[in-house]
Image (cartoon, coloured by chain):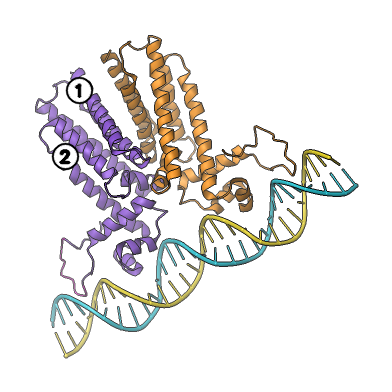
Chain colours: A purple, B orange, C cyan, D yellow
Amino acid sequence: MVQKNSASAPATRGRPRGFDTDQVLGQVRDTFWRYGYAGTSMDQLSAATGLHKPSLYGAFGDKKRLYLAALDNYLAEVRAEFAEAFAIPNLDDSLYALTQWSIDKFMPADDGATGCFMMNTAMTEAGEDPEISRVVRESMESLERAVVRRFQKAIDEGQLPAGVDPNPLAMILVANHYELSGRARAGYSRAELRALADRTLDLIRTVAGVAA
Amino acid sequence: MVQKNSASAPATRGRPRGFDTDQVLGQVRDTFWRYGYAGTSMDQLSAATGLHKPSLYGAFGDKKRLYLAALDNYLAEVRAEFAEAFAIPNLDDSLYALTQWSIDKFMPADDGATGCFMMNTAMTEAGEDPEISRVVRESMESLERAVVRRFQKAIDEGQLPAGVDPNPLAMILVANHYELSGRARAGYSRAELRALADRTLDLIRTVAGVAA
DNA sequence: TATGTACCTTACCGTATAGTACAGAAGTGC
DNA sequence: GCACTTCTGTACTATACGGTAAGGTACATA
């Protein structure tokens, strides 16, 4: 869907691109992350990437396509890191890693942008743009399915009682994820976010142990 | 903090204002709600309110003050409606009313703006604007405290077991509230939102009954 | 009725915005 | 080496943006 560069070398004729697409998309993403979609100008993006505007337009089309490329890039990265956390065998460790990853992502040590990139930028635009709205919805459903699968795996492996319904557990975890994003943006500290996540994990254990 | 007009008549001298402040703020709010803060122009607001720009500037200051006034207006309305739902004696009825109110607000029957006004507009701006960030944080804490108080009241009145901790229950409900907003903006249907809310209320009953 | 005040309206200002035309440079296949 | 393709850089356009100057007007007090 989006042009690739760094990975595949398609052996084209003319002069090869002088920048790395993924790196540029990362800088684009960080800028949108801070200022929002409408609040970010192409000049800002040009300054952040070091590319001149015609290069950006040539490589990505227009502002919206550039944004969607950055969003794709972000979501792919998120999915990969989630998969990594989910791959941890012990359920508690896995969930802890997941929440801690969210906190690290949403509240970076350097003074980067806070909260979830998608929640902070796409939600606003989703109101009037069905294309962005669709991406948001698909992302939400994808996350939810992945979490349900992780709980189901724990049930299958006997880490949770056999009769447990994974869906409410997933619902709690997903809601917590979005809430962490919002609270990070609202200025809560890492410690407060960690405490919130810990209470959520306690709650999940309670519900899982109970509904057996 | 913000100018009032419709309620108090301060007996000023000159020509009285020819518009109703609350009504104008409502139209301003709806416009910001749709397009976001940065995505809304003063010309749009002028068209939406029927007021010319100098009137808007004269009455509210600049774009940001106008936005903050609309946000205050929204949050006051939300608090009032929440208080109404919380005043319902039976806990289940009260929580159902609360969630249904959220759904109605976030997914209006006419094709108005979806999701929570604050979540859809202030979250983006909160990244770079501490004033907006503070409003968001205070609003979140205010909501959480109100929900805790409602559960505590149910405990005091014997509608929930005496030993129950109201905090996890409040955490579930608050997280659900924000999730409803996000999903509404992402295009979920009213039925899907209602189903999500019902599952949340089931979960709260389970947790409350269990942790007794 | 006189007077002061705050309103409404039109027209405007400087700047920032998204997007582009064009010329030149740089790399690749033949 | 040559031709072709694509990138890079500068300069630009037309429009939209937030915000305002200034004159006229309607209302409440006195």
Q: Position of residue B94 (x, y in %)?
A: 43, 19
Where's the N terminus of chain B, which quadrant? top right
Q: Is residue A30 visible?
A: yes
Q: Secondary structure at mark 1?
A: helix
Q: Residue furthest top?
A: B158
Quarter occupied by residue C27: bottom left
Question: Residue at left 35%, top 26%?
Answer: B173
Q: Nearer the viewer, residue B184 or B52?
A: B52
Q: Amino acid at mark 1?
A: Ala
Both on one chain, marks 1 and 2?
yes
Q: Is residue A202 magenta?
A: no
Q: Is residue B94 left or right of residue A73?
A: right
Can residue A171 be seen? no
Q: Which residue is mark 1?
A: A208
Q: Quadrant of the C terminus of chain B?
A: top left
Q: Chain of mark 1?
A: A
* Image position, residue A74 (x, y; %): 26, 50
Q: Residues within 10 Å of mark 2 (few under 14, many from 20)?
A: many
For the stretch drawn in magenta, the main secondary structure is: loop
Q: Nearer the viewer, residue B149 or B26?
A: B149
Bounds of the magenta segment: A7-15
Q: Which residue is mark 2?
A: A85
Observer-nearest residue: A187 or A8? A187
Image: A170 above or below A23: above
Task: Give the letter of the chain under mark 2.
Answer: A
Left/right placement of residue B14 relative to residue B91 reads right
Instruction: Identify which amino acid the numbered label 2 is placed on.
Output: Ala
For the residues labelled 1 and 2, the Cα–Cα distance comes to: 20 Å
Q: Quadrant for residue B141, please give it.
A: top left
Q: Quadrant of residue A3?
A: bottom left
